[in-house]
Image (cartoon, grey):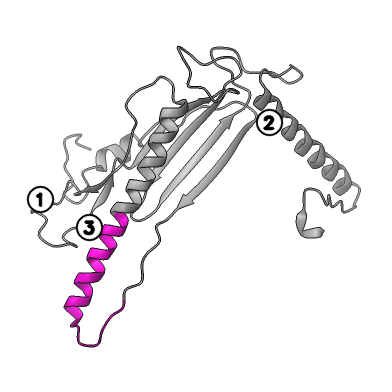
Amino acid sequence: MNANLKIPFSQQYWTTTREGHEHPPPTFGAPTLVWHLGLSPHWPRRQVTQDQTLEQIHEQLAKTYESTRTAFFGEVNGVLQALQRAASFPSRTAKTFDAEDVPAPWKKPRTQSWEPFYVASPGSIRFTLWWSDTDGKPSPQPGPDALRIKVLASAHRDYVTLSFCLDAAKPWDRPPVAAGEAPIGIRRKRVFDHIHRVRSICEARLVADSQGERLVDREVCPSTR
């Protein structure tokens, strides 16, 4: 296939077929805890009167949709800025979304609320946090107690997903903590304590299942209380 081939309906065709992902996936050690969070805006209700035409109703709904979506991304940007100011390393200008970006393939000027719909740019934002026990901003570099947290924020048409990947075993500028070693830092120790507890419960269940028994831990399964 010709590398200079241009596809009119997808300017990302070559990137998608040859590079795959927008960003290469980060590497993590074991254990790594993942928290995946979805955020969506609250859409206000609009009262429609019977004397309004269908065109007027559509115009009102389109404006409400765009203004609500823009305000929502503004709130999301505030969260991203706060996270990056607090513990991002190295310190740099906070990455945020532009909620009112016009898709690149759209050549005509935007004359109506729906021509075309706005998209968020960039499509995803990622950064690394080093969360220390003292909650202090790393200066000049994180200490050995800081937890490594990779953050991935992905923008969709009218919602955002946030993924927090806590690489508990990886301290700053040191080899990962191996099994049996004492973890450095209060928070890292708490993470390892919880992980060991969950592992012991899972191992006990595996033994019980192998013996044809059913083991229910009431502390882990609140629904059985």
Question: Counting residues from the N terminus, which is met first, the one under dot 3 or under dot 1?
Answer: 1
Q: Is disc 3 placed on a helix, strand or loop?
A: loop
In front: label 1 or label 2? 2
Q: Is disc 2 placed on a helix, strand or loop?
A: helix
Residue 38 in percent (x, y) is at 48, 51
In front: label 3 or label 1? 3
Nearest the camera: 213 or 178? 178
Q: Mark 2 = which residue? A: 191
Residue 186 in percent (x, y) is at 68, 23
Q: CA distance from mark 2 to mark 3?
A: 43 Å
Q: Residue at x 22, y 73 (%)?
A: 58
63 inside magenta stretch: yes
- Say few, some or many: other residues with alpha carbon within 10 Å of mark 1 (under 14 / 14 to 19 / 20 or more): few
Q: Mark 1 = which residue? A: 107
Image side of residue 107 versus residue 101, left or right: left
Residue 94 in percent (x, y) is at 34, 30
Q: Residue at x 34, y 23 (%)?
A: 92
Q: Mark 3 = which residue? A: 117
Q: Are marks 3 and 1 in contact (CB under 8 Å)?
A: no
Which three-letter amino acid code belongs to the residue tagged 1?
Answer: Lys
Q: Quadrant of residue 20?
A: top left
Question: Counting residues from the N terminus, which is met first, the one under dot 1 or under dot 2?
Answer: 1
Which three-letter amino acid code belongs to the residue tagged 2?
Answer: Val
Which three-letter amino acid code belongs to the residue tagged 3?
Answer: Phe
Q: CA distance from mark 3 to mark 1?
A: 13 Å
Please state the extent of the stretch shown in magenta in the rendering.
47-69
121 inside magenta stretch: no
